[in-house]
Image (cartoon, rainbow, N blue to C red):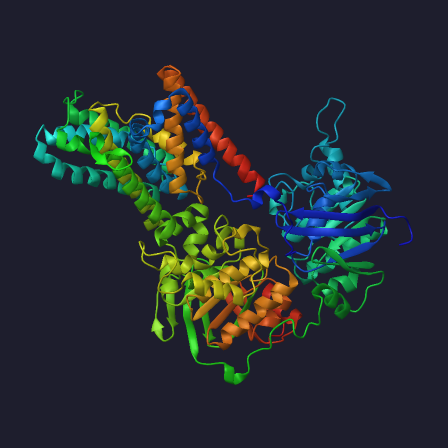
Amino acid sequence: MTDSAPVIEMKGITKSFPGVRALSEVSFDVRPGEVQALVGENGAGKSTLIKILSGVYHADAGEVHVGGEAVHFAHPVESLQAGIAVIYQEFSLLPERTVAQNLFLGREPRTRFGLIDGARMRAETREVLSLFAAAGRIDPDRTVGELDVATQQVVEIAKAVSTGARVVVMDEPTAALNEAECEELFATVDTLRKRGVAIIYITHRMREITRLADRVTVLKDGEVAARFDEVPAPDAIVRAMVGRDIEDFYAPPATPDEIGETILSVRGAGNAMLHDIDLDVRAGEIVGLAGIQGAGRVALAMALFGQTPFEHGDVTLNGDTVTFRNPRTAIMGGVGLLPGDRKAEGLVLMQSVRDNGMLTSRAFGKLWGSDRKNAHADTDRMDELLDHMEIRAASYDQDIRALSGGNQQKAIVARWLSMRPKLLIFIEPTRGIDVNSKAGIYHLMRDLAREGAGILMISSDLPEVIGAADRVLVMQEGRIAAEFPHGASEQDVMHAATGETGVAA
Amino acid sequence: MTERTETRGLFSRLPQINPVWVLLAALIVAIIFMNPGFVEPTGYMNFLKRAAPLAILAAGQVYVITSGGFDLSVGSLITLVVVGSSMLTNNDPTATYWVIPVMLGIGLGTGLVNGLVVCFLRVPSLIATLGMMITLNGLAFMWSGGAPRGYLPDTFRFFGRELIRDVPLVRFIPVSVIVLIVVVGLFAWLMHRTNLGRQVHAIGDNPVAARLAGVSVNRTRITAFMLSGLSGAIAGILLGGFAGVSTDVGTGYELQAITAAVLGGAQLLGGRGSVPAALGGALALTAIFTLLNFLGLPQPVRQVVQGLILIAAVALAMHRRKQTGT
């Protein structure tokens, strides 16, 4: 089955963005009827590669062959016509139209009089859907917006099949699915494979690779780090992804005597998005906060930081009762926060690296005071902090936007270090940064904890929360639903996060 | 991922000179070519004197632009200051000493109201200050009853009109040039050497990130509008000195100030802006007007040219921005 000629062949693909080389000399191929897992850390270049394949980006160098012919897609529509369908995490379906209308969007069957042939459309929709296990649940006349995420995904895949896609790319398709829905998706993937469709399956989850993949390609820092013609043991894949052994990737957890007294204590707090929050963070401890999108993790961080404050309940910080009405009062109270969206919420991109590092200390300096020196920092000390964090920049006077994600993140950390916060909240601290910088951030968080800060870390990357935190709290629907110790199993945490009755530790 | 690709050529290794200075130098050469007398103190000092109100206005405007807004109200503010001063002084030379502080207060107050409206009523600055522009114009008209009194006392006109003589090297310096140097110097220091200036840059660059970093966004934005209002009042006091009293003395100055700031490389929608470069922009714009004057071109041509310059400067800035990959 995997001996046939590749349907997609990408050779020597190279792509640079200003300041970053996203892909260099990447070669990649997929054969009909195989599932090729494409794995790698965030920022390894997976999505760039897919965007080149689907015509969103153009490669600086390299060739793309589809069915043996060289192609140059100028627009995603052309790749679609060539039989390449990409199922993104956000679906492209129209929520107000029916399943059948979505499936035949733009190519509706016509009657003799040129009107849309609704009966035929529905019949053909049923036929396409019959390939999938979920078929019984889907009425072609239901509007898509009424369907749950898993069913919408099936419709999206059915749409790809009905347009005659030879290649289906799935970008972390299980991210929003529960256990049973995942099993159904796997069955769908098997169906597609049997029909000779080539599948590029992007995932972070080893379990899915073991279950589904025929071959595995590992990207790391924009290069092919490993290629496996048979699925190897998960450790081998992780080692290729991370580029080193996993043990020293995360800093070691805190020993009992490193953990001090309680810094933050929240009792019965809540607002429109949060309910009955009880939470303690102690000095020297990293508390991880896991949960699915919308479970309230970011809402909790923003409530603690005064951006969307609690409306009731008690918060004490270092023994004092506090109410933070905005970030400024929270910062004055000794809280710091690294936002989850670096570019939208963290950086002032047109300013220099040093200006980004100095931002908060200047905000609390005298308005007319010198920008080189204030009560919390001066430029020399900031440069030392930036040096200490090994930020790679031509000069600290350089615009920060030219730096890589990891270096940008370190500059934001430096911003907070100068304020010496008692509680530091990290939201998705390693999103979109390279592997070595990730390890750097984990060790940095540990160092801060050792120096006596309490740390709350929110992450959607389950292995990261479990590996880097001393305890993991799981949130679900605005509540803290479960707590796990360091090193809990990924599966247990996932169960708690998705609300299935798992066995809490 | 972290390796930086070399996207810049050899030329960028040379010190980066703001193109506005090249433009200004070229224009001055052209002026000297057409009028050799320009190299004499009477030539260039009169030029600086004429440019002073616009340069001061641009120095204030650059705060608002860098903070991510526009201030269209300063032209009308100039009119209000000139008309109001003539009403209040009422030909009494001693009144100047309290009228000037009142006028500076009106400037700061206008900026305060602009800032409050933008921050708390969430009116976009373009609309808020456009409304203020119309309001102030109406106020100036009402105050003067449509027929402003003819002139201001000499004590008031001192700032716009007088010269300090017997200065070594340059023979004389107009008082307005001294005002120009002091005000622009002060504004430049505030913008580029203080916490305030850095925060003005930050809120124009990314207000969300600035707030989450603890910047008091509203306070900073209101301060920027107040400084722009203050610059409008100072420009009005100078203009009252040499242009006399009328109800259209400030007309069009707001757009000239924006043009000057943009010529100096200020980023529309915020994040980048320089007071010295805005001064360069104001001098370049005045130089262009001077040249058009030498060429004997009438006022409407001047307006056409100014409009085209504004569009060209913004287009160029957008082009540069695209190249640097924002």
Is residue A308 in view? Answer: no
Q: Is residue A288 left or right of residue A370?
A: right
The residue depicted at 52 percent of the width and 35 percent of the height is B318
Residue B212, position as x, y percentages in the image: 43, 56
Residue A327, position as x, y percentages in the image: 39, 59
Q: Is residue A271 left or right of residue A183?
A: left
Q: Is residue A267 above or below residue B260?
A: below
**Quadrant of the image containing the N terminus of chain A:** bottom right
Identify the residue at the far front of this view: B169
The residue depicted at 75 percent of the width and 31 percent of the height is A109
Residue B199, position as x, y percentages in the image: 39, 51
Q: Is residue B189 left or right of residue A358?
A: left
Q: Is residue A64 left or right of residue A282?
A: right
Q: Is residue A4 above or below residue B23?
A: below
Residue A413, position as x, y percentages in the image: 50, 63
Query: What is the tally of numbered marks visible in this picture?
Result: 0
The residue depicted at 63 percent of the width and 76 percent of the height is A487
Q: Is residue B8 above or below residue B135?
A: below
Q: In the image shown, does B233 or A451 lie closer to the viewer?
A: B233
Q: In the image shown, does A366 or A398 lie closer to the viewer?
A: A398
**Quadrant of the image containing the C terminus of chain A:** bottom right
State the image quarter where residue A35 is shown.
Answer: bottom right
State the image quarter where residue B78 is shown.
Answer: top left
Q: In the image shown, does A134 or B183 lie closer to the viewer?
A: B183
Is residue A382 in view? Answer: yes
Q: In the image shown, does A426 or B234 lie closer to the viewer?
A: B234
Identify the residue at the far bottom of this view: A257
The residue depicted at 81 percent of the width and 52 percent of the height is A191
